[in-house]
Amino acid sequence: MTSEAATAGRRCPRCAAALGRASKFCGACGAVTTEHRTNVRAARDSERREAQRATLAVAIVFAGTLAGLVAAAHTFEDHARALELTLLGSFAAQFAVGALALAVLGRGAHRAALGRWPSLPLALAAVPIGALAFVVALGWVRLLPGSGEVPAEALGPWATLALVLGAPLVEEWLDRGVLWRALAPLTSERGRIVTSAVLFGLAHGLNGGFLLEFPHRFAGGLALGALRSRSDSLVPSFVAHVTWNTLAVTLVP
């Protein structure tokens, strides 16, 4: 017989039978206990609120990133140092958008966005993957002559540094960091890879050249997302992205 100490005075709301301290269902009639019903409702409310915050964060990342990049490009398009200022403006816009999305997601989101430190083999494997992404991109660009990448000789030292290190740092943090975290309660791992690749492709296909940029950027984004998924870290995708941009800056005439 269940003791009063074990039941702590808990009774079934339907048949008044004594309940165990942690019982979810009545052993006599099978009714759901009041406490369990309350806990299930609270869990559902929590999941719904998390999904709402995540949806808002995803919308902020997509809308804010695309709007910020367009604004930066058009603001400085006639300036003598248009490329450098556009890069700086786009970095600032993406950082602001990411910070706002993390604030919406709440405590601990920034850690989840960064992930953990990866294993050395995965970090090293990122280099050939980045090189392969460059080869795919170059092959696609060669199929559409007349609108290639910015010539390497036209880049100053600051612009080169921004393209080789700054862009991978900001874009990986936003696309496969902040957005990656925001998508967690909304879709599967495969969905996160595809969605982050879509943003990556869209961001590079703005202001004209969409057909030139989006296909190979999307394909490269899938590879970067696969690295993020496999490693649970931003480091491999960042290394691959740096490799890709370094080859583009140094080898494309």
Image (cartoon, rainbow, N blue to C red):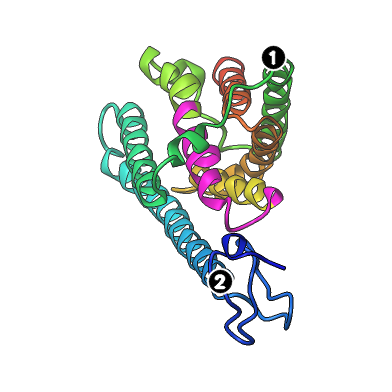
In the picture of the structure, the residue carrying the numbered disc 2 is: 10
Q: State whether residue 223 appears in this view.
A: yes
Residue located 58% across and 50% down the image: 184
Q: Is residue 197 magenta?
A: no
Q: Is residue 182 magenta?
A: yes
Q: Which image quarter: residue 149? A: top right
Q: Main secondary structure of the magenta part?
A: helix
Is the residue 144 above or below the residue 1 in the image? above
**Label 1 residue SS:** helix
Q: Position of residue 133 (x, y in %)?
A: 69, 30
Disc marking residue 120: 1
Answer few, some or many: residues within 10 Å of disc 1's Cα (few below 14, many 20 plus, some between 14 and 19).
few
Nearer to me, 129 or 231: 231
Is the residue 153 above or below the residue 102 in the image? above
Residue located 58% across and 46% down the image: 196
Nearer to me, 239 or 214: 239
Nearer to me, 222 or 151: 222
In magenta, the rendered stretch is: 169-190
